Structures are given as C-alpha cells and as structure tokens.
Image: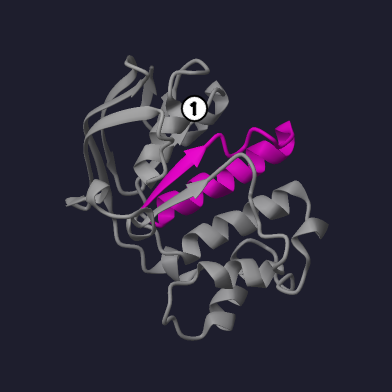
Amino acid sequence: MTEQQTNATSHRLQLQDVRLSLRGTLLLALDADVCGGEIVTVMGPSGAGKSSLLAWLAGFLAPAFRASGTVLLDGRNVLALPAEQRRIGLLFQDPLLFPHLSVGGNLRFALPAGKQDKDARVQAALVAVGLEGYAARDPDTLSGGQKSRVALQRLLLSEPHAVLLDEPFSRLDASLRRDVRALVFSTLQRAGLPTLMVTHDPEDAEAAGGRIVQL
C-alpha cells in the first residue's frame, strides 16, 4: 500500500453554480459537493460538455468555451491557481504513459520536487498494484490493465487532493474493465480523495457507488 493510501487525509471538492457554454449556448449547469472518498458520476449525451467540465476544473479549458462559477478544494478557490498548483489529478481513456521513460521513470516523474527516497516510493507503488520488479520495463511492453495500474499509481504519487476521471475504463475489454475499475475506485476511496467521474457507461456509474448527476 502506498504512503498516500496509508496516510490519507480526507478532502472536499465543491462546485457551486457552475455553468459551461460554447459559442453562447449553455451546455451544462451543475452544483456538486464531493466529500473525501466519494465518487460522483456525471452522465449525459455526447456534446453535453462532460469532458470540457473536467478540463476546466483541471485548468486547461479550450478557448472556445466559457465557464463560470465557484470551485473550492478544501475551501480554497482553485480557479485562481494555475493548473500545476491546483492539486487535481486526472485519469483519461488512455493511460498516457510517457513512451521515452521506463515504468519507474513515469512514476518518478510524478513525485513532487524535494521528495526523499524516490526509488523506494516508486517500488512501493508498484508492489501495491502487483507490479513488483517492473520499474525498468518499457511501457509499450505492458498490457492494457498494467498500463492502467501504472497510470493510477502515477496519479497517487503526485499527491492530488481531488481526482477527475474521464471515461478511464472505456478502452478496456469487459473482464479487465471490471478489475481495473474496482482497483481504481477502492484505491481512491481509501485515499480519501473526492472524485468526479464522467462516463457513458451505467455500469461504471453503478460500480462507483456514489451520486449520479444526469445532464
């Protein structure tokens, strides 16, 4: 188990009067209060602005969109901060592992500056997801499920205070999807991280076990 999981501090993500529009057309309106360890799912048709909502929260919304509202993380207004200071982690459809780095290099990249014992932290993160001894591996040699586990641990090593999930299981086959989904959800819940997930899949929403917001 990683340090982030064993020494978790519960966090809180609050979205107040959030509005997202594109070229003057309102796409979504949302209020949500996500407690530590809770997974709130946002569902809706394609083009409803789900992924753009996550992009805005993370700090890289495309210029064509307009967004307003208040976003608090542990009572702090994250909208006033650059993306790298928001302490918000993301998991996407693609694990997005850096191909020029080893598995261990991908994990070390996520560690905040000044962290001690980086190699030990990386090894502990790999052990926690059944990938002991994989630090030197090329990411391209991993299976889809293994890549997803590395991406999850890379996120945790960055020490986020909240997590956004953007259809993170959609490219996995059915049996692997269930296993990876269970691992991701249980890990984030144990870590006390408020999580906002967007998905088209009702099974993902049901497995999350939290509130479901329909757009």
Task: Work out whether residue 79 can be spotted.
Answer: yes
Task: Work out whether residue 1 can be spotted.
Answer: no
Q: What number of labels is visible?
A: 1
Q: Residue 109 occupies which quadrant of the picture?
A: bottom right
Q: Which residue is mark 1?
A: 206
Residue extending furthest right? 141
User: Measured along the vertical axis of the image, is residue 21 above or below residue 152?
Assistant: above
Question: Left or right: where does residue 106 sit relative to residue 208?
Answer: right
Q: Quadrant of the C terminus?
A: top left
At 44% from the left and 35% from the top, the residue drawn is 62
Where is residue 81 drawn, in percent x and y?
A: 27, 54
Where is residue 73 drawn, in percent x and y?
A: 25, 50
Closer to us: 183 or 195: 195
At 40% from the left and 34% from the top, the residue drawn is 63
Where is residue 145 drawn, in percent x and y?
A: 71, 49
User: Measured along the vertical axis of the image, is residue 106 above or below residue 73?
Assistant: below
Where is residue 89 drawn, in percent x and y?
A: 44, 52
Q: Crowding at label 1, few (<14), some or many (≥20) Cα neighbours within 10 Å? A: few
Q: Which residues are magenta?
A: 162-191
Question: Left or right: where does residue 4 sit relative to residue 73?
Answer: right
User: Measured along the vertical axis of the image, is residue 17 above or below residue 82?
Assistant: above
Question: Left or right: where does residue 129 sit relative to residue 121?
Answer: right
Which amino acid lies under the numbered mark 1 shown in the image of this protein? Answer: Glu
Q: Residue 65 occupies which quadrant of the picture?
A: top left
- What SS does tag 1 mark? helix
